[in-house]
Image (cartoon, rainbow, N blue to C red):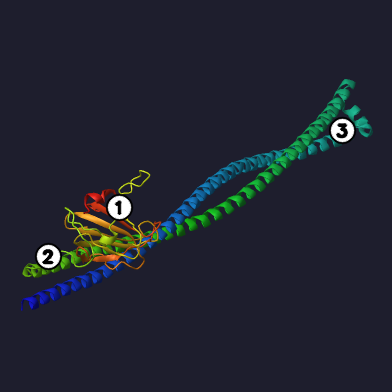
Amino acid sequence: MKNLGKKIIGVLLILILLSTCNISLALDAEETKLNNEKSSNKAKEEQLEAEKNKVTEEKNATVKEVAELDTQINDYESQIQTLDGQISDANAKIQEATAKLNQAQEDYDKQKKMLEERVVALYESGETNYLDVILSAQSVTDFISSYYVISEIAECDTELLNEIDKKKNEIENAKKELEESKNQLTSARTNKQLVASKLEASKSEKQNKVNQLSESEKNLQAKIDEIKRDNAAIDQAIKAHHAEVQRKLDELRKKQQAQQNNNQSSSGGSSGGGTSGTSSSGFIHPVPSAYAKVTTTWYYSTGAVHGAVDYGPAGINGQPVYAVADGVVSETHALMTSYGNYVIIAHTNGLYTLYAHGQAGSICVSQGQTVKQGQQIMRVGSTGNSSGPHLHFEVRTSPGTYNCRKNPLNYLP
């Protein structure tokens, strides 16, 4: 009956361990799914950030182009305003010249008419009518005086007429020059207005592009914000998942402890593995005793810090790797470089142990799984940055990061 009771307890312990593994595997699968989704979202976020940065750069460049076009347009508009002023001045001068020309023409016509009348009078007082002049004169002096006055008036009118005609020609020439200048100014203004219109059209086109890019920028940022919200929700789910794993493991540990307490003959030690000897830290060797030979210590032969110990005697390839003490698997990874296939276990004494370079596909535990001292976790291999089959073994203090490494020889038997 006593043996039967032990068998029953043994079966119950096995069932608890299997249940623990199944729960851990199920929860780990869920966490892996969440982490994969988070990683996928992170990749999308980085891609969207890159797209957004590209759009922002393009928008900023276009905004700069718009500003440059604004400067050019303002410059052309300033030139056009100057030309408008010059054209306005030219128009005023042309109007003034036209008024002067009209006045000169009027003076010319008036003076010409007076001259013609005087010429007729002079002609009539000429040789044909000399007798009238003589007869009408009171004296010879009076006759000469009358004839001289008429001649002088006619000559003066002729000179005045010539002067008016000359002035009229000068005004006409000045008016022509003003009109030519005005035409040139008008042509220059038309050309500048044409350029300004083209610049304005280009500016409008680029401004539309800026608006579109700004909208794209907003849409990309909205997508990035959405992904960040999704990742925040995933982080919350992972935290909840960790809490659930811890809760389930605590429940199972209590059941396991209760069963162990009922089993007075249970040693609470190894559940497997061909190791021997336990250190003061409660650790055993992580490989079978026949291969428990440290081939590389805390320091390399060059004097550089190794940060670990290596088990690498001949024939170790494929040998089982054991958990050096009870604990919970905190990480398992399969890398092509660095540690290669490796496992990290957190122990109840606050220490962490790392086992690296395991054979590809040989890891037989999962994150969150409870393991017993001496339980196989993988096989010795040469994955990652390795020159040959060996087990790379590290001891770390809390929180188990790379900078927390300690010399394993201080903890091993």
* Residue 312 location (% of width, % of height): 34, 57
Q: Alpha-carbon neighbours of circle 2 within 10 Å: few (<14), some, or many (≥20)?
A: few
Disc 3 to disc 2, C-alpha distance? 162 Å
User: At 54% from the left edge and 49% from the top edge, which residue is drawn?
Assistant: 69
Q: Nearer the viewer, residue 172 or 232?
A: 232
First-in-chain label (3 vs 1): 3
Q: Quadrant of the N terminus?
A: bottom left
Q: Alpha-carbon neighbours of circle 1 within 10 Å: few (<14), some, or many (≥20)?
A: many
Q: Mark 2 points at which residue?
A: 267
Tell me, yes or no, if residue 301 can be seen here.
yes
Q: Which element type, helix, strand or loop, lies under badge 3?
A: helix
Q: In which quarter of the image is the C terminus?
A: bottom left
Q: Does 219 sit above or below residue 90? A: below
Disc 2 to disc 1, C-alpha distance? 29 Å
Residue 168, by quadrant, is: top right
The amino acid type of the residue labelled 1 equals Val
Q: Mark 3 points at which residue?
A: 122
Between circles 3 and 1, the one closer to the viewer is: 1
User: At 89% from the left edge and 29% from the top edge, which residue is drawn?
Assistant: 133
Disc 3 to disc 1, C-alpha distance? 143 Å
Q: Nearer the viewer, residue 288 or 346?
A: 288
First-in-chain label (2 vs 1): 2
The amino acid type of the residue labelled 2 equals Ser
Q: On residue 309, which mark appears?
A: 1
Horizontally, is 163 left or right of 268 in the view?
Answer: right
Tell me, yes or no, if residue 226 can be seen here.
no
